[in-house]
Amino acid sequence: MKIKNILMFCGAILLTSVILVSCGSDDNYDFPGIDHERVYFDKSNILAVGSITKTPVGYIADASKKFSVKSTALFTTSTHVNVAIDESLVASYNKANGTSYVAAPEGTVVLDKSALTILADTLSSEDSVTITVPESSFDKLIDKAGYLVPIVITGSDNKECKASTNAGIRYFLLKIEEGCIRKKALNSDIKGTELSDHDKWKCISATGFNADEFQNLYSGGWDAQWNMSAKKGTFVIDMQETKKVTGFYVGNYALKSVSCQISSDNVKWTDCGSIDAADMYAKDWSSKMAVFYGAMPCRYIKITVGLDETNQWIEYYMNLSSFGVYAE
């Protein structure tokens, strides 16, 4: 009797395991128990991000993204999947994710096509839909909160499948930024040449630095540096005459970020923005460069340097080992 009970118990466990394995093998594009096939967006769980940056020399756009669709089964004929932008989904997205994005004004963000094709006996669309922002829309997109663009599968011409209920939407976030500093700049982005008349420059104010020691940076030798008394410091340099500045660099092994302002009279200042060290151009083994989108005329340049306080060697890096300016 005991043996019979044991066998029945083991059988129940085996049956439960089979059921669990069967359920666990379902793809994650829909709910269990659906009795028809689905079409869905590839990488639907990833938020695609683009940006438009307003600079003194015009707009810089990185706002073109491509999306493709897939099916859960092979079909004997081609399937045409319809897609469209649906601004009505922005509110529900914000509520679910605790965000405050806004819907893009009608016509400012567009798709290059309204249908994608999954050929017979294939699982992925042969083409993709591209979302773009026409140049004529740039000056209409000004909300710094960011624009959320939901792209949805609205249906298909294949009666054997329907749009996925939980993977039938791709979200595209368009960030609106303003500044002068180019992120991830390349060597080819650097314009002008490094200024060599730094012996004439004067540090007219400083916090976290001793202004009188600024010229120590150019004293020559391995110990040429400008000591810092805090992990964040700001200094203002008078270059004695107006320069068409295209960028600047600073040297510090524990650099976290820099920000810049420029002025022609030391009264009215233009904010050039800030940039993380990871996004700066590596000029050499110790210096990072902030590259401007275009030449910015100025006589005074104000730099704020922030150090990475999580760096275990930060106490040894409480200084700038270099500072230089490029201009046309």
Image: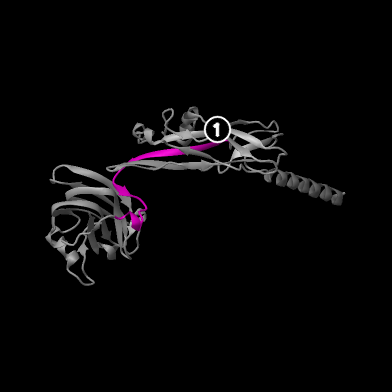
Residue at 71% across / 45% down in the picture?
20
Q: Quadrant of the C terminus?
A: bottom left
Residue 261 is situated, as x and y percent measured from the top left of the image, at 22, 47
**Taking 17 as reference, is 257 left or right?**
left
Residue 299 is situated, as x and y percent measured from the top left of the image, at 15, 50
Q: Quadrant of residue 154?
A: top right
**Taking 104 as reference, is 152 left or right?**
right
Asked if residue 197 is positioned above or below residue 155 in the image, the reply reads: below
For this rendering, which residue is in front, 132 or 49? 132
Q: Residues within 10 Å of mark 1 (few under 14, many from 20)?
A: some
Residue 294 is situated, as x and y percent measured from the top left of the image, at 27, 48
**Taking 152 as reference, is 234 left or right?**
left
Residue 283 seen:
yes
**Taking 212 as reference, is 142 left or right?**
right
Asked if residue 27 is positioned above or below residue 36 in the image, the reply reads: below
Query: Residue 152 lies in magenta, yes or no?
Result: no
Amino acid identity at mark 1: Ser
Residue 159 is situated, as x and y percent measured from the top left of the image, at 69, 30
- The magenta span reads 168-190
In the rendered image, the residue lying farthest to the bottom is 221
Residue 31 seen:
no
- For label 1, the residue is 114
Query: Residue 183 lies in magenta, yes or no?
Result: yes
